[in-house]
Image (cartoon, coloured by chain):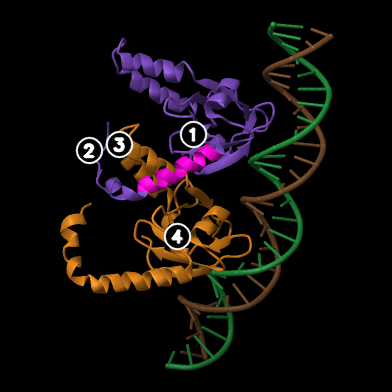
Chain colours: A purple, B orange, C brown, D green
Amino acid sequence: MFLSTTINGVDAKGRVSVPADFRSVVRGGVFDGIIVWPSFDGPYLEGGGQALLESYQRLIEDMDPYDEARIAFERAIFGAAKPLAFDANGRVTLPKELIDHAGLDAKATFVGLGSRFELWSPDVYAEHQASARAFARENKRSLRLVPRNGGGS
Amino acid sequence: MFLSTTINGVDAKGRVSVPADFRSVVRGGVFDGIIVWPSFDGPYLEGGGQALLESYQRLIEDMDPYDEARIAFERAIFGAAKPLAFDANGRVTLPKELIDHAGLDAKATFVGLGSRFELWSPDVYAEHQASARAFARENKRSLRLVPRNGGGS
DNA sequence: TTGTTTCCCATCTGATCCCATGTTATCCCA
DNA sequence: TGGGATAACATGGGATCAGATGGGAAACAA
């Protein structure tokens, strides 16, 4: 499970250390690294291990082949996703287009969200985090109101 | 079950002994430790074992993937949750941001709440207890109505 | 060649591990 | 039932190690 928030440095080469906790989540798969793509919902990146992408693929395969939404998701996620391999020290090199999308400068914020994580510019994230906490506080009851409908699916 | 209230010391390194009763609750899982995050509802911390977080994850996964409330909860809980492993003596090290959020100094109050627990600064907790008792006294008539509305689960 | 990317090594900081010690609760036996 | 022995728990400090980071050399592409 990806948990917690970590701010790590991005050097001049675009390298950033992936938090050790996150590395241990994806370790063991065939691809030793993470897969990252620009969010279509805001100026941040989304990422996860290969298993996450495979679960997305299963979801999308259930949609009609020429469903507009399916094509849009395929392009937005698979088309833009970059596999980033770890180097010997657990770092990855972020391509320029990802750095630009998230507006990253010298620092990057990793946000663990359970099955996936996000990558933000630290100051941009600070704003969003404050509003997320406020929203969660105002809607805290709704977390209880969603008791399982039957578990699966 | 997390039960009872315990005050333990927080040393200069941010280490605090987790009450032995609490340790035995989470022992046996894959992760030998507790997971703690800042409450978005006040100056205290919430915590539990990995099983608690997984139950939260199941609740959240029943919401729509891009539901605003879902993302807010994910960021407010998973994004802020820190896995804290026990050392050989049953202590965990609290990161600075958690210490700051709860205003912890030399002591911390563990409050067992069944499936989860809370961590307070002892004096803040005493104050909170006092005002909670006062509130209950002033509203004792309406307390009867609460079970009808919110008693669910 | 020139610029870019990948790989490797060095360093520093902070977290984790380990050992020692005090204190309290529990157990056992007189 | 009381007192002493013992074990469990809580705490403090120092040493060790892993993680994060910076720079440079080598491989590669243009």
| Nearer the camera: disc 1 or disc 4 | 4
- Residue A88: quarter of image: top right
The range drawn in magenta is A123-136
Q: How far, Cα to Cα, is label 3 from label 2? A: 13 Å
Tell me the kind of residue under disc 1: Glu
Q: Which residue is mark 3?
A: B63
Please tell me whether mark 3 sits on a helix, a strand or a loop. loop
- Image coordinates of residue B13 in percent, x first then y, are 63, 60
- Residue B91: quarter of image: bottom right
Asked if the residue under mark 1 is in contact with the one under mark 2, i.e. CB atoms within 8 Å, the reply is no
Q: Report crowding for label 2: few under 14, some 14 to 19, many 20 or more residues within 10 A (C-alpha).
A: few
Q: Nearer the viewer, residue A121 or B24?
A: A121
Q: How far, Cα to Cα, is label 2 from label 1? A: 29 Å
- Image coordinates of residue A34 in percent, x first then y, are 54, 27
Q: Report crowding for label 3: few under 14, some 14 to 19, many 20 or more residues within 10 A (C-alpha).
A: some
- Image coordinates of residue A70 in percent, x first then y, are 34, 16
Q: How far, Cα to Cα, is label 1 from label 4? A: 26 Å
Q: Is residue B95 visible?
A: no
Q: Which residue is mark 4?
A: B43
Check the residue under mark 3 and report the chain it is in.
B
Determine whether, in the image, residue A65 is placed left or right of residue B18: left
Please tell me whether mark 4 sits on a helix, a strand or a loop. loop
Query: Disc number at residue A118?
Result: 1
Query: Disc number at residue A12?
Result: none
| Nearer the camera: disc 4 or disc 3 | 4
Q: How far, Cα to Cα, is label 1 from label 3? A: 19 Å
Tell me the kind of residue under disc 3: Met
Tell me the kind of residue under disc 4: Pro
Q: Earlier in the sequence, mark 2 or mark 1?
A: 1
Q: Which residue is mark 2?
A: A150
